[in-house]
Image (cartoon, grey):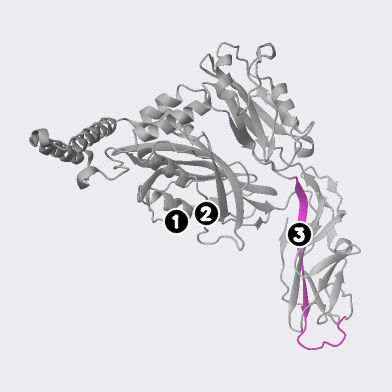
Amino acid sequence: MLSRLFKARSTRAAVAVALVATAFAFTAGSPTSAAPQTKSLTGSCAGADDASRGLLAAFGGALALPFTITSDVPATLDPEAPDQPISFTWGITIAASVTSQIAAIDPTLTVKDLSLDMGISGPTDTTEVQGRPGPVDIAITGGQPATVTQGPFTGTLEGIGKGGIIKYSPKKIALTISLDISGKTTDVKVECSAPGTAATTSIKIPGSPDVVQPIELEGTANSSVSVDVLGKYVTDGTDENGVKRPVQPETLKVVEGPGQVVNGQVVVNTGAAGTTSSVTFEVCSGTLPGTNEVQTLQIDPTGEAFKKGVALTVKLGDEVSPLIWLVPALWRGTTPTPQNWLNTANDYILRPHELPSPADVQAALEALPSIGGGGVKVTAGDKAGLYNIEFVGKNGEKDIDSLAIDRYYSVFPQEVLTGIIDAAKGLLGGGAGGGPTTTLPGGAATVDEAIAWVDLQIAIEDAKGIFRDWTRWGDLQVQRLDLMIKKGLSDIDVNAAITALTGLFSTPPQAATLTAGEDPIGICSQGVIDVSVAAASVEGASTGATGTAGTSGGSSVAGASLSLAG
């Protein structure tokens, strides 16, 4: 997604931004849960101030980052449980493919002002765990992955409620990348958002079925035990309003362990003598509504003659929408295409500019097969050019791939900006700080040394008078002119140049996720059945395909484990 900017010095900036745009791998610290929860989220990062936004705009705007989060939190809790410890350890892993590009340019990069905060919502008084590490230098070796970890950042769940789902989501992700551009330290401030749930802690939801525990049985070796859990161990739950919620028998399923549901009963497959088979089952009394995904589309509202948009297309996966026009219907001329735009753009300089209506954006999105009619609801946002896109109907209550901008036709054309940047690469390729991009004459280490060497060679040729080597003398003069140009350009402020260039153009549209879609949550409870097989035959023990719950030869089985997850 990033396009290169200035060769050498600004390639340093591009690669530095790219390395931060690599996957974040989070590794757990001291466990507070037997099974840490791992989730991958797609984040969106952008510049936090005008200078940083100007720099990132030259690379295409917002950055899409994949995040992998391992949250060391309790998987389940009893209602009103005592305070619980939680922790998160964050790390940055730079892939070998990236280090191979940057090692020769900047072997050490500094990342500072990090905010790695997790937001917490649900039935707990705790709202966040802050991660605020100090600056870190990342050493780069070409072709070798580089990893640096931060944390663990610890916290405590306090004031745990009676039921529901505690959700952990990235709340604030921000960082500053310190770069060396032309011998000057330049800070690029970045803020990221990663909508979605990284992990959950389940508390028995009011209204979920009540499950009697423990369920401890005995069986025979390499056989099976059929357990009527719905008839003997599961009863209707009561919600927060005191209303009974009937058990839904069709929801009974085996979650884990050697078993299956047969004719409405859980059948546990037993092992060899002296072993215990443990099966976790789940049953529900309904579902809580999920969350509709909401994405945003921001279009530059600027209507200046030389700095305005004309049309755009949006894509979802490989599907591309029809044109979304920013020109009134009566003033639309030649339909923009990638092939004709550079020749057509001037025709739109004096044409009116008009932001599309939410209905226009909705119609274009509904033309995508995966969205379809009634698949989205588009409304105006709280500022000009902002559109809220809620996925509804068949697309409601589930995670949706992120929309992206396919083409943006503007005056001046964005292709011209790319051309200017490409031309600037040749002009700003060398100079102080970034070092020469080609070998300097005379084996010089700096441009100044090279100029001195060329001046000496010219003086030597001049001393020869009419016997001088005129071809060499001419080549030396050309070399000197080229070196003087390099020297004159070495003090150019790259950030200022980028900001000035990008400021001439309309800001490309940006699509982002505001609220991640989530599936409905079942109002469910879990229980565990432990079936033990004695090491030796027990007189009167049940055999065959069925067993008697809680008895074995007329006596209860001791020591079976208890597990209940709501």
Q: Residue at x 51, y 21 (%)?
A: 412
Say whether residue 330 is left or right of residue 159.
Answer: right
Which residue is painted at 56% across and 21% down in the image?
343
| Mark 2 and mark 1 residues within 8 Å of each other at the beta carbon | yes
Say which of 288 and 18 sits in front: 18
383 shown above or below 292: above
Residue marked by disc 1: 147
Asked if residue 95 shows in the view, the reply is no
In space, the residues marked 2 and 3 are separated at their CA atoms by: 31 Å
Q: Position of residue 261 (x, y in %)?
A: 85, 64
Please tell me the numbered disc located at residue 526. Answer: 3
Residue 549 within the segment the image draws in magenta: no
Q: On screen, 103 above or below 527?
A: above
Placement of the C terminus among the 4 image quadrants: bottom right
Q: Where is residue 362 shown, x and y percent of the image?
A: 72, 27
CA separation, marks 1 and 3? 39 Å
Q: Secondary structure at mark 1?
A: strand
Whole-angstrom CA distance, mark 2 to mark 1, is: 9 Å
Amino acid at dot 2: Ala
| Residue topped by disc 2 | 25
Of the pair 3 and 217, the residue shown nearer to us: 3
